[in-house]
Image (cartoon, rainbow, N blue to C red):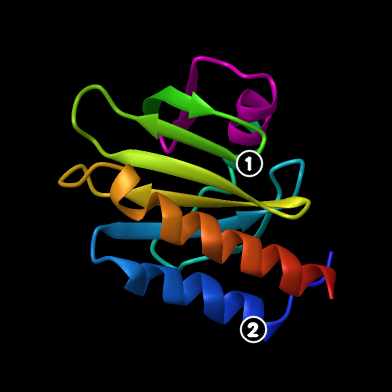
Amino acid sequence: MIMNDQVVQMLEKMLDINENIYGVALVDGKGKVLAQTANWDIRKDSPGFVAAWNANQGSVSLLGIRYVVVENTPERLIGTNATGKGHVIGASAGPAKVIVYINPAIGPTVVLNDVYMDAMRIGKLMAS
């Protein structure tokens, strides 16, 4: 899987889509972190996150926070924390996945389309 500076820059720019996006990571199909923003280290939890997504489980965990899955398709996963600790969105980027942490102040659907479109662009970049 090709990682280049352009992909890393796109990940960093995802933080600028909305001030409520707090962390972004790019993982391979098994959950190995390929790149992540400096403020969010999910290396320990990302394989379990991807496994839960693929197995269509009812919840996922990252950094000790449990998120109830409210939507799960092969293209995307949306999880929300019942105690107000935020949301996660997973979006397919070709064979890779983009995982984003969102502030509880907004609903995940506010940024979903932008995250999804950027993930598709990242997938295309990695394939080229």
Instruction: Check disc 1 and report its element: helix, strand or loop.
Output: loop
Mark count: 2
Q: Quadrant of residue 82?
A: top left
Asked whether residue 104 is in view, the answer is yes
Farthest residue to the top: give it: 58
Q: Quadrant of the N terminus?
A: bottom right
Contact (Cβ within 8 Å) of mark 1 with mark 2: no
Q: Is residue 126 left or right of residue 103?
A: right
Q: Position of residue 128 (x, y in %)?
A: 84, 76
97, above or below 86, in the image: below
Where is residue 13? Give x, y as percent.
44, 76
Question: Seen in the image, is 72 located left or right of residue 68?
Answer: right
Q: Earlier in the sequence, mark 1 or mark 2?
A: 2
**Farthest-out residue, bottom:** 5
How far apart are labels 1 and 2 at the CA level? 22 Å
Q: Which mark is residue 75?
A: 1
Image: magenta residue range:
49-64
Q: In the rendered image of this protein, does residue 56 appear above or below residue 119? A: above
For the residues carrying marks 1 and 2, which lies nearer the camera in this image? 1
The residue under the point 52% across, 35% down is 77
Q: Disc 1 marks which amino acid?
A: Glu
54 falls in the magenta region: yes
Kindly identify which numbered label has been placed on residue 6: 2
Q: Secondary structure at mark 2?
A: helix
Report x, y in % for residue 89.
45, 43
The residue drawn where x is 77% and y is 70% is 126
Residue type at mark 2 is Gln
Instruction: Give whichever of 124, 23 is nearer the camera.
Output: 124
Is 102 placed above or below 70 here?
A: below
Asked if residue 86 lies in the magenta stretch, the reply is: no
Q: Residue at x 34, y 74 (%)?
A: 16
